[in-house]
């Protein structure tokens, strides 16, 4: 079996989509919690040089969210809606407010590999190939790599326990 200790990012050649695969030393419940608990999410999402503030966060099917990241005097806002929140899958929209026409539909599935390991499968579908290519060129991979390294540390130190509430 392959192990993906670093995120593998690929552009789909046939449709305007980006796929992501990454393994974690965590259970699916821990990863769902890390993606839906706003206090945890703000601690790990994005590049190391950005500070994240949650504006609002309603991580349930039909809920919405918004966060802002800052670096020096620069501010970057993001928002979207949760379309599905389950124990093994998250579906949501994602919009960078600097490019409001570039909405993506993101699906994350959490594959239980056993022995406390989970494979994250992500797919971001966008409106066109130009949008997809702009996202890939934006520094997305760097932000994801640094963010997932922060998440690895939070998982390792016990900060991210299993989900405690049902959706």
Image: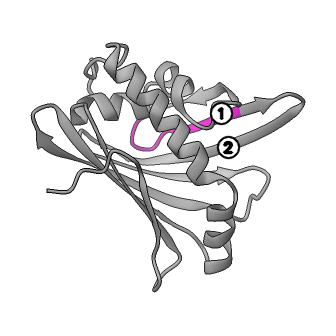
> Is residue 166 something one can see in this rendering?
yes
Residue 102 location, quadrant: bottom right
Identify which residue is drawn at 28% across, 28% down: 30
Identify which residue is drawn at 70% across, 30% down: 49
Give the mark, 1 or 2, whose residue is nearer the N terminus: 1
Q: Which numbered marker is on residue 78? A: 2
Q: Is residue 127 above or below residue 145?
A: below
Q: Magenta stretch: residue 65 in it?
A: yes
- The location of residue 126, given as percent across then percent down, is 56, 69
Q: Which numbered marker is on residue 155? A: none
**In this view, which residue lies farthest toward the right?**
73
Q: Quadrant of the N terminus?
A: bottom left
User: Relative to residue 120, is residue 70 drawn left or right?
Assistant: right
Q: Residues within 10 Å of mark 2 (few under 14, many from 20)?
A: some
Identify which residue is drawn at 30% across, 50% down: 4
User: Relative to residue 40, is residue 1 drawn left or right?
Assistant: left
User: Which residue was labeled with disc 1?
Assistant: 67
Q: Secondary structure at mark 2?
A: strand
Q: Magenta stretch: residue 142 in it?
A: no
Tell me the magenta residue range.
59-68
Q: Is residue 147 above or below residue 19?
A: above
Q: Is residue 14 above or below residue 36?
A: below
Q: Is residue 58 above or below residue 132?
A: above
Check contact, mark 1 vs mark 2: CB within 8 A.
Answer: yes
- The location of residue 158, given as percent across then percent down, is 31, 13
Q: Secondary structure at mark 1?
A: strand
Q: Residues within 10 Å of mark 1 (few under 14, many from 20)?
A: some
- The location of residue 45, given as percent across then percent down, is 55, 34
Identify which residue is drawn at 32% across, 20% down: 156
Q: Quadrant of the C terminus?
A: top left
Q: Nearer the viewer, residue 8 or 28?
A: 8
């Amino acid at each position: 079996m392959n192990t993906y200790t670093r995120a593998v990012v690929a552009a789909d050649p046939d449709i305007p989509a980006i796929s992501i695969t990454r393994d974690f030393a965590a259970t699916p419940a821990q990863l769902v919690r890390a993606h839906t608990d706003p206090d945890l999410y703000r601690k790990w999402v994005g590049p190391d040089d950005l500070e994240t503030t949650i504006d609002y966060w309603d991580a349930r099917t039909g809920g919405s969210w918004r966060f802002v990241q800052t670096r020096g005097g620069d501010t970057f806002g993001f928002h979207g809606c949760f379309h599905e929140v389950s124990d093994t899958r998250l579906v949501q929209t994602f919009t960078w407010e600097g490019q409001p026409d570039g909405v993506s539909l993101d699906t994350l599935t959490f594959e239980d590999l056993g022995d406390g390991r989970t494979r994250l499968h992500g797919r971001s579908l966008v409106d066109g190939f130009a949008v997809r290519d702009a996202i890939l060129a934006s520094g997305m991979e760097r932000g994801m790599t640094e963010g997932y390294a922060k998440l690895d540390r939070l998982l390792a130190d016990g900060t991210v326990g299993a989900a405690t509430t049902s959706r």
